Image (tube, coloured by chain):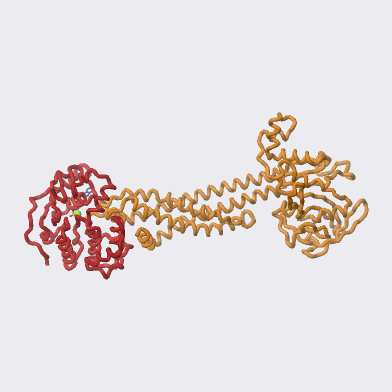
Chain colours: A red, B orange
Amino acid sequence: MGLITLENVSKIYGEDVKALDNISLDIKEGEWVSIMGPSGSGKSTMLNLIGCMDTPSKGVVKIDGIDISELDKKELTKVRREKIGLVFQQFHLVPYLTAVENVMVAQYYHSMAEEEEARKALERVGLGHRGNHLPKELSGGEQQRVCIARALINYPKLILADEPTGNLDKENENIVLDLFNELHDQGHTIMMVTHDPKVGQLAERQINLDHGKLKDTPQISKERGLVS
Amino acid sequence: MFLRIIRRSLTRGLKSKLLAIVAIAFGASLATAMFSVSLDIGDKINNELKSYGSNIVVEPESESLPVKVNGVDFNPITQNKDYIPEKHIPKIKMIFWRHNIVNLAPYLEANAQLSEDQRVAVVGTWFDRKIRIPTGEKFNFGVKHLKSWWEIQGDWIKNGDNKALALVGREVAEASNLKPGDELNLDFNINGQTVNKKVKVKGIIDSGGKEESKVYLPLNLLQEITGLKDKVAKVEVSALTTPVNDLARRAQENPDALSDEEFEKWYCTAYVSSITYQIEEVIPGVVAKEVRQIAQSEGVILNKIKLLMFLVTLAALISSGLGISSIMTTKVLERRQEIGLLKAIGSSNLGVIALFVTEISLLGVLGGVLGYGLGIGFASLIGQQVFGTAISVKLLVMPIILVLSIIVALLGSISPLRIALKLEPAEVLHG
Ligand SMILES: Nc1ncnc2c1ncn2[C@@H]1O[C@H](COP(=O)(O)OP(=O)(O)OP(=O)(O)O)[C@@H](O)[C@H]1O
Ligand SMILES: [Mg+2]
């Protein structure tokens, strides 16, 4: 059994908006999966379900063996805190905290804030020297790298990224994707939503969504490496 | 880390924070003013009660006969009028309810000629007399305490001063152009003979009342001049009393009509009627009467003012709370992203609430301190304008105001915090 299992999962908004429609899926530990599909096809919805920020209308979502459809909000928060690192398209940093403090917040909610370690995490994403800067003093790419450092800080099994390069230029996109590559090599499981087929191809496996349904059987992409 | 977050977030959105502080300060300042004024006015009411407040008058029995018609004294025995022996006065402090006797002062009145066409009432009294009662306790009695609202330009006449000293009412002083230190020439007509006495003006009385047209001498001095040794015409007593109820009313009409049990209950309660009864018991030949109607109506008015102030303050606090509520709602909506983010990276609802509550409480404290400062200003303004006295601010008010400010700030934040609670990270962070 994989790290993530979806069994006949549907997410229905209101009466008839089927954001996800009867999806079954299995993702193994250490896999890098990209989720692709047109706008409105349910990519973010799927990521939110796996990220414990939402619960399915039907079906079962299991993460690391835990059936999250049965958890209450508090327990969902706990799973998210302990097993999942999140990276968003719009960077989402706390505006009045410095880079290193933004990383420390995640530590704080997980267990205990340790500045030393937070600074190391920033070094890992190449921002060791920018730790005391506020988000507004950083470029978009740098902000996204802070987000990645924050997602990593608690050594989550699973990293969920919703279009992490969507707001970045080519150069920064490459830096960020390199980071994901590294993370993957270190054994993190990665699920990344993307619109860009080239980015999607970096993953070992692509999931195509269309109108909330899986479009075709996920295939393993052989070519992995940088998209230039 | 928690404190670090708080510290950082405090520096942000200064404008709305200032606004929140001002909103709290507004309510807090009125509350401070209200508390200070009511606490102080509470004391002042008591003083007032004591002043208009000599709430019991003790007179010789004959004095109380209804012989004054239309202000004309028809008392046939003016010549050998009855007096109260001065030596009996300390007995008033020895009745069952002696602890309720706050102060007292005896009076003896005479007339004197200041100049050919100027007559003046001269009053002999205790200013600040030290009295020792048989139990060994000592008390300072006299008008200095009884008429605590008198303002003296110059000095009070001290204990034991039976020298030729006088306090002169403001009107008299102005008419004769007197100031402290001046000499005053008084011509008394005693049994058809003119007795001349020169006294030194020690101080000038501002009382706002009829005292301003009189001259006050030490009691013993006037007794000497008039030849009425050891005699006083009237004693004013200030006593703390229990509000009158039915039993007290019936007792006032006729204490003998009460049953033994009722009598005991009445006697052992500090009704003004039981106190006057007990005074009459210890000093033979006197009538003690209650004269507190004025004081009571003053008290009623002050209580109404207090109620009004309380309502105004309540309204101010409510509007502070509403102000906070709308400011905080804007804040929470502004910070939706941040709240969602904190929840997404693992903060519990409690964690988010703790952040906001701490921040709000800090704003509450700041607003409270600011409001306290403003409120003291308000209080003294109210004191000067409304009550004509300085308001002394009680330290006790400070913690009350701080707690109140925090409570108002927190109450105002309930509905914005509910928004923060309901916020789902997925709603604000969707990609
Ligand atoms: N809270 C919601 N209420 C109602 N409908 C919603 C809600 N969230 C998403 N939807 C609908 O569900 C469908 C899937 O949305 P989702 O955000 O998963 O799309 P997406 O694949 O991430 O699109 P994009 O590429 O534009 O981000 C859409 O039709 C969207 O309108
Ligand atoms: Mg999306």
Figure check: B345 above or below B69: below
Residue under the point 45% across and 58% down: B21
Q: Position of residue B215 (x, y in %)?
A: 80, 56
Figure check: A145 above or below B426: below
| Residue A99 visible in the snapshot | no
Q: Quadrant of the C terminus of chain A?
A: bottom left
Q: Position of residue B141 (x, y in %)?
A: 75, 51
Total marks shown come to 0
Toward the left, the furthest residue is A222
Instruction: State left or right for residue B331 relative to residue A57.
Output: right
Toward the bottom, the furthest residue is A129
Residue under the point 13% across and 49% down: A26
* Observer-nearest of A65 and B177: A65
Q: Answer with the quadrant where ligand 2 appears in the image.
A: bottom left
Instruction: State left or right for residue A55 relative to residue A217.
Output: right
Where residue A146 sits, quadrant-wise, is bottom left
* Observer-nearest of A49 and B96: B96
| Residue B383 visible in the snapshot | yes
Q: Position of residue A174 (x, y in %)?
A: 16, 66
Q: Position of residue A37 (x, y in %)?
A: 13, 54
Where residue B73 sits, quadrant-wise, is top right
